[in-house]
Image (cartoon, coloured by chain):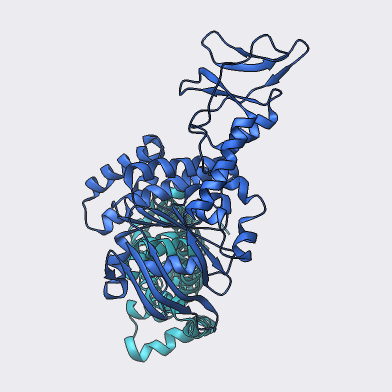
Amino acid sequence: MIQFDAVHKRFPNGTTAVHDLTLDMPEGGVTVLVGSSGCGKTTTLRMINRMVEPTSGTIKVGGKDVTDQDAAALRRSIGYVIQQSGLFPHRTVLDNIATVPLLLGHGRRKARARAAELLETVGLTAEAGKRYPHQLSGGQQQRVGVARALAADPPVLLMDEPFGAVDPVVRTQLQDELLRLQKELSKTIVFVTHDVDEAVRLGDRIAIFRTGGHLVQCAPPAELLARPADDFVADFLGAERGLKLLSLKTLAAVPQGPAPEGDTWSLVCDETGRPLHWASQRTELPVRPLRDGDSLLAALDESLASPTGLVARVDAAGVLTGVSSRDDIHAHAGQAHADARVAA
Amino acid sequence: MSIDWSWISGHTDDLTSLTVSHLQAALSAVFFGLLISLPLAVVAHRIRPLRGFLLGFSNVLFTIPSIAIFVLLLPVSGLTRTTTVIGLTVYTLVVLLRNTVEGLDSVPAKTKEAAKAMGTRPLRTLLTVELPLALPVIMAGVRIATVMSISLVSVATYIGDGGLGQLFTDGFQRDFPTPVIVGVVLTLLLAVVADALLVALQYVLTPWRRRRA
């Protein structure tokens, strides 16, 4: 969908921002560009909608060279979400979202109707549409930013550290929302971040850049974590990259058995079957029940925290279905690593 | 120094027409001042090297004594309202130009960037993003320019215009304080009312600044 072919970018001051970049970003997938600051990831993103012009090489979107197109028209056909949202402070939330449809000459009424629809899509109330950006929280502003980028239903979405300025809890929510949206919309998304965990969570493919604008490795997250191309990538992914790999796997396949009864510890549930806590004769300890979709990493974590080494498994309604042992979880974790090595 | 109230009641028509003429001169100056300042400010904002020159030039104009300006203009436009308005317009430039440039400077880079990235062309960005966001600073300039012009109109009495300023010369010449006092009070009132109206106008034009979170 987006193809970089031997792209160079040198700024007038002589620094090379992007060095000989050849990269394919597949249609309907999330490509995450990561690297420390000054590695050229943002420049790479901004060359796609011609906010930055390449010094040499070609960039194609949907098979068409971007430099052959009118820059403003090209930008209207590509969604763009910026750090700290970049909303227009003097326009209501609704009019902010309607920006591109209005530029495209859709009528005001039609543009606003579309904007109202999108408010809901990104999880905001209709009431929020009448407000001005400064009246919203940082997380809400980011949602508006995403809605604005989606307004003209562009096939491509560029996101430049969109969740960089919000707190970790909101950040996780926004990431979840993006994944949910992406499931529905299947956009071609290019996402820039310096946060490895965010990259692993969101990316179908991750491209790691090194200072000087060199692309070091581009691969699916599991492959990247199992087989980093060199020490730079390994260092960048961090010492816990084995654990990060587990965050990509769910515990659906881990076998479960019946909850223990009459042992030192027993699992106490409420009358509907939802786990409440672990109980011994002397004390109670908290339980964090997990669903099939939760990650092996979460399961491993809970198995260490649980007094019995057992992880309570629940269905979508939160009702206990069984427990999994630390050994089974460990075995699956090991298998996940072995699989990743083979796949890579 | 007592006020001759009967003089006032006997001259309401004159006072009304002088007030209207006074206000008209001042507002024309602000209008033309804006007309000239806006494009110049855009140029000064976009083309850095011209900025110092344009702002410096408007400062120099401001230092010319007001009577001198009228005298200089006499061969060009004579003893007319045009001379008054041109003279006053020159003085508004220094405030209007500087504030408009500063207003444009105050627009966050992030916001302009967003407009560009959404596919807004430069002229539309200027009209629909930059100028609205610069409005509070521009309006601060308009308020100063308006009040300043209202007080300056009187100087044009020297060239036979001057609105309410004519009351001062009249009063001084006849050693009769009432017209002077009335002139001062009406000028003050005009300035206060005009300023209040501009504050109200700004309130209407910038709805996003009303409800602070």
Can you say whether A9 is above or below B127 in the image? below
User: The chain shown in cyan is which?
Assistant: B
User: The chain shown in blue is which?
Assistant: A
How many labels, in total? Answer: 0
Q: Which quarter of the picture shows residue B14?
A: bottom left
Judge left or right: residue B65 versus residue A92. Answer: right
Judge left or right: residue A202 versus residue A300. Answer: left
Can you say whether A79 is above or below B98 in the image? above
Q: Position of residue B204 (x, y in %)?
A: 39, 50
Can you say whether B188 is above or below B64 in the image? above
Judge left or right: residue B169 versus residue A185. Answer: right
Asked whether the viewer can see residue A106, the reply is yes
Asked whether the viewer can see residue A199, the reply is no
User: Which one is nearer the viewer's eye here, A121 or A102?
Assistant: A121
Q: Position of residue A300 (x, y in %)?
A: 63, 35
Residue at screen point 45% across, 68% down: A44
Residue at screen point 39% across, 87% down: B73
Furthest toward the right, the residue is A282
Q: Position of residue A30 (x, y in %)?
A: 41, 53
Residue at screen point 37% across, 88% down: B74
Q: Which quarter of the picture shows residue B170?
A: bottom left
User: Which one is nearer the viewer's eye here, A74 or B168?
Assistant: A74
Judge left or right: residue B140 versus residue A233. Answer: left
